[in-house]
Amino acid sequence: MGAGKRVLLIIAGGIAAYKALDVIRRGRERGLEFRIILTKGGAEFVTPLSVASLAGSKAYTELFSLTDEAEMGHIRLVREADLVLVAPATADLIAKMAHGLADDLASTALLANDRPVLIAPSMNAVMWQNPAVQANVATLRARGVVTVGPGAGDLACGEVGDGRLAEPLDIVNAALRILGDGPLKGLKALVTSGPTYEAIDPVRFIGNRSSGKQGHAIAEALAAAGAEVTLVAGPTALGDPAGCKTVHIESAAEMLAGALKALPADIFIAAAAVSDWRPAAEAGQKMKKRDGGAPPRIELATNPDILATISAPGPKRPRLVVGFAAETEKVVEHATAKRAKKQCDWILANDVSAATGTFGGADNKVHVITATGAEEWPRLSKTELARRLVAKIAETLKDKAR
Ligand code: CTP
C-alpha cells in the first residue's frame, strides 16, 4: 500500500505517546517508512531507543545536537518526508504550530515544512473544548492541515469525553489516504458547493443561505479517499478544504464555467445551492433610490442548470453524478422526480424547511435516492455524512468497470 512513502512522525509529550509505537508498527506493516522526532515531553513518555528500534531508524530529539545536525538537519528531515504526522498532537504543540513558534526541533521542523501535515490531537476533554485550542485547530485546518480524531471515551486523566487519540490504525489509514493510497486513488472528482451570488448592481446581489459546509466536507472526504478533487465554490465563510484544488466563483454562470473546465471527471457532486434566477441585466452603477419614485422592478433571467448540463448523456459525462434536492415538502417524491429530470445517478434529498436547521447547520439528514429506490440515512454531522457518501461512492465504483 504505502510502499516506500516516507512519514516524518513527531511524537509530542502526551500520555498517549505510547500509542505512537503502534502507529509505527502498523504503518510499517503497510509499507510506510518512518523518521521520528521526539519532543522533550515526548521523550518523557517513550524512550528514543524503543521508538528507534520499532521504526528501524534513529529518533531525533534535540535541535542543537551537533551529531544530529551533522547527520540530518531539520530542513532535510522535512524535505525527505512525503507527509508529516504529529501523533499525539498536544495542545502545546498545536498552539506552536498555529502561531509559528520554533523553539525546539519539532516546532522548527514543522515551521520549515511544506509537505502535507496530519495531526492526531490528544488531550483532556475540557482542554480540547477550550476556545483557544479550538481556534488553533481551526487555524491549522484553514491552512490545509488534516486532523484525525480525537475520539470520545475514557481518558487517562480519569475523565470521559472527547480527547482520546484516534486509534493507531485509523491514524495510519488517514496517512495513507493523504499519501494518495485511498480507495478513490486515480479518480478525478468535481464538487460544487456554497451559494451563488447574482449581481443586481455593483453592491447588491440575489443570494441564499447556503453555508457550503456539506459540499466542502464532501470535497475534503473525497480528497481524503485519494481522489483528485476540484471544488468550485461560491462565496462562503469557510477555508479551502484540505487536499483539494478550490476555484472561487460568485455567479451561477461562473460556477458552470468553472465546473466545465474541470471536466473530464469520474465523479461529479452538485452540492451547491445555485440561484435559479439572476437579474436579466446587471446595472453598471449603484441603483439610486430617487425620492418618491417607485421601487425598481428587477427582471429575472433563468440560470443554467449545472447539474442537468453535466449529467446529460455525452462523452464527458462523469461515471457517477450525484445531486442534492433541497425540498421543504414531499421530500422523497419531489427528489425522485428531480433525479429523473436531471438524469443524475443519485439524489441526496434533504428537508431544508427552516425548522430543520439544515441550511447553515452542522448536521444533515438525507434520503439517498438511486435507480433502485430511496434509502433513509440517520441524522449525521455534515462531516460524517460526507464520509458515508464517499464510502458508498468507493463501493459503487469498485464494482463498475473502468
Ligand atoms: N442545481 C444546479 N444548477 C442550478 C440549480 C440546481 O446544478 N441552476 C443543482 C443543485 O446543486 C442540486 C440540484 O441541482 O444538486 C437540485 O437543486 P434544487 O435547488 O433542489 O433544485 P432546483 O433545480 O433548483 O429545483 P426547484 O428549485 O424547483 O426545487
Image: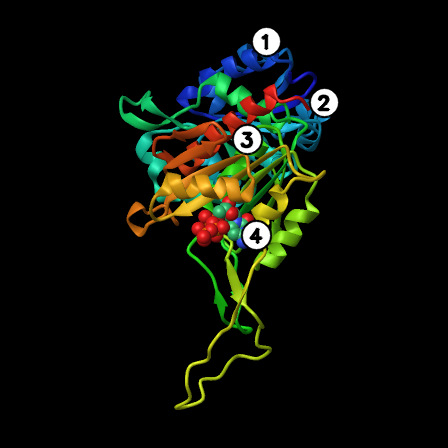
Can residue 341 be seen in the rendering of this structure?
A: yes
- Tell me what residue is drawn at x 31 percent, y 34 percent: 126
Comparing 133 with 169, the one in front is 169
Q: N-terminal of the two: label 2 or label 3?
A: 2
> Label 2 sits on what residue type?
Glu
Mark drawn on residue 71: 2
Q: Is mark 4 within 8 Å of ligand 1?
A: yes
Q: Position of residue 159 (x, y in %)?
A: 27, 25
CA separation in Å, label 2 and label 3: 25 Å
Q: Where on the picture, by quarter, is residue 224?
A: top right
Disc number lying in front (3 or 1):
3
Q: Position of residue 338 (x, y in %)?
A: 48, 44
Taking 380 as reference, is 302 above or below it?
below
Query: Crowding at label 4, few (<14), some or many (≥20) Cα neighbours within 10 Å?
Result: some
**Disc 3 designates what residue?**
118
Comparing 298 with 16, the one in front is 298
Query: Crowding at label 1, few (<14), some or many (≥20) Cα neighbours within 10 Å?
Result: few
